[in-house]
Image (tube, helix red, strand yellow):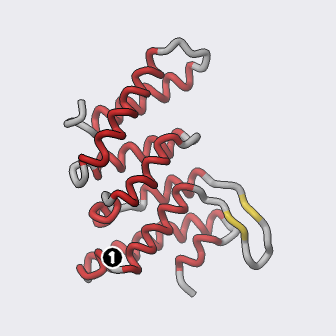
Amino acid sequence: QSIVDFLDHESSVIRKKAVTTCARLLQKNMEVNYNLYNSQTTILVIKRLLNVAIIDEGESFSSHTRWPPDATIRTAALQSFANQFDDILSQPYFLKQLFMLLYDNEFEIRETTIELLGRLSPKNPGCIHPTARVLLLELVRQVLSPVEDIHKRENSAKLLGILIRKYTKLV
């Protein structure tokens, strides 16, 4: 049985371990065998890990039970993308998936996504910078707007700080 199959396990502990294990195994294999960089298997595993990052929910085929999304697993999936995956993740298909996470309800997901996109930015600035500029304007607007929710303004200010640090050529 493949470790990828455990990404759909009903136990959140097992799903989280499967995420980190898949990424580590793929990373180690890519270090040894350069041909894996563009292999179908590598791309499929990265797609699957990104899918977990976008929405960690599913249904167990054995017990037919559903589980709610788990932000810690989703964050772990994003954090599992090592530098070896940058050439693949900086392709438009994967960037579009990552851009969706910029508007996630979970602060940690947005924070991790901004940091990841900042790392990918030199690989594909033509695709990343326009979206980063829009995000920059939205965050400035949120920080300056008089909103009731001070926590939202504080989070926007933190994200703005990360964006400015990670996208030095943008600002």
Residue located at (49% from left, 47% from top)? 101
The foreground one among 144 and 26 is: 144
In this view, 32 is above or below 159: below
In this view, 129 is above or below 11: above
In this view, 169 is above or below 146: below
Horizontal side, residue 83 vs residue 103: left or right: left
The foreground one among 159 and 102 is: 102
Pointer 1 residue: 28
Instruction: Specify the quadrant that holds the C terminus.
Output: top left
Give the amino acid at mark 1: Lys
Residue located at (36% from left, 40% from top)? 131
Instruction: Specify the quadrant that holds the N terminus.
Output: bottom right
Horizontal side, residue 171 vs residue 51: left or right: left
Q: Quadrant of residue 14?
A: bottom right
Total label count? 1
Percent coordinates x, y for residue 109 in the rendering:
50, 46
Residue located at (44% from left, 74% from top)? 44
Percent coordinates x, y for residue 29 in the rendering:
33, 80
Percent coordinates x, y for residue 15 in the rendering:
60, 67
> Please, what secondary structure does the residue beneath circle 1 have?
helix
Disc 1 crowd rating (10 Å Cα; few below 14, some 14-19, many 20+) is few
Residue lying at the far bottom of the rendered structure? 1
Percent coordinates x, y for residue 22 in the rendering:
46, 73
Residue lying at the far top of the rendered structure? 146
Residue located at (29% from left, 32% from top)? 164
The foreground one among 108 and 49 is: 49
